[in-house]
Image (tube, rainbow, N blue to C red):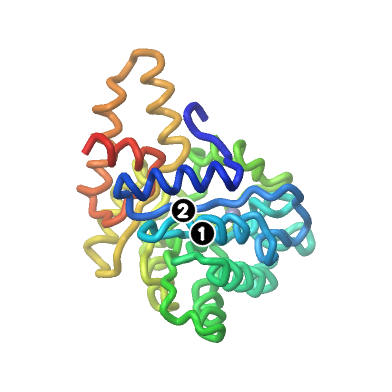
Amino acid sequence: MPGQYTMSIDRAVEVARETEKLGVGGLLLFGLPAEKDEVGSDAYSEDGIIQEALRALRQNVKDLLLITDICLCEYTSHGHCGVIRHKAVDNDATLPLLADAAVSHVRAGADMVAPSDMMDGRVAAIRGALDREGFSNTPIMAYSAKYASAFYGPFREAANSAPEFGDRRGYQMDPPNAREALREIATDIQEGADIVMVKPAMAYLDIIARARRMFNTPLAAYQVSGEYAMIEAAARNGWIDRERTILESTTAIARAGADIIITYYAQELARSL
Ligand SMILES: [Zn+2]
């Protein structure tokens, strides 16, 4: 995507310092390992890319919240969010690996973990593992209502994480289904999520608004890569006013009820606001 880069650790440290100075609340980190394998080993390895990055970042930023994405799809050779058995994702066999990833990230310096995999029972599995390891104060931001969306396209290309067979509709949510989102959010809160999330944002503002009315748990919304890409492409063509569109799109997410906005525009907004 124009203006977005995968980074080496030293560059990530520079960006984190700058972001902290701008007063942005936190960084959400996604790992892109040198080697991918069937079980996504780099996600929970002590010397995985995220663990190494966290140790470097932790030495350089104090106030910036370091949040890590917890999933296997960036780390698996097949691009699915869990381990595969009989050509399908094995939900229950994936849970301990996600829990291991969360524990190893927190050990390396993460302030909060953000499971994005949509496996059933993963918030409880991660909460239990963190508590057992003495990290009972570390919060979980759960991607609770994550729709199987076309808007994820640019990110997947950047992370080289498009599934090599099938798709993610077995574990991500069906776009026409609104009530299931509320059930998923309720389940995650029950399992111990401290923040719940709706993703993507713009095409799901109704879900954000419904979640806001129904739950008191802090609510995050993720303005995803496809939303960013549409704004950038249209602005480059001279079809829209880029700055106004950025502000209006994020204002809409806040107006719908999100307490936290995850956006590629965080630095830019912090500067202009
Ligand atoms: Zn995933």
Give 62 or 169, whichever is nearer the viewer.
62
- The image shows residue 58, relative to residue 10, as above or below, that is below
Can the viewer see residue 117?
Answer: no
Q: Is residue 75 left or right of residue 63?
A: right
Q: Residue at x 40, y 78 (%)?
A: 190
Which image quadrant is residue 145 in?
Answer: bottom left
Q: Residue at x 44, y 66 (%)?
A: 111
Give coordinates of residue 126: x percent, y percent: 54, 75
- The image shows residue 107, relative to residue 152, as above or below, that is below
Task: Give the residue at mark 1.
Answer: 68
Q: Is residue 115 left or right of residue 144?
A: right
Give 114 or 144, whichever is nearer the viewer.
114
Q: Residue at x 36, y 38 (%)?
A: 265
Give 114 or 82, whichever is nearer the viewer.
114
Image quadrant, ligand 1: bottom right
Residue type at the position of mark 2: Leu
Q: Residue at x 69, y 48 (%)?
A: 166
Which image quadrant is residue 184 in?
Answer: bottom left
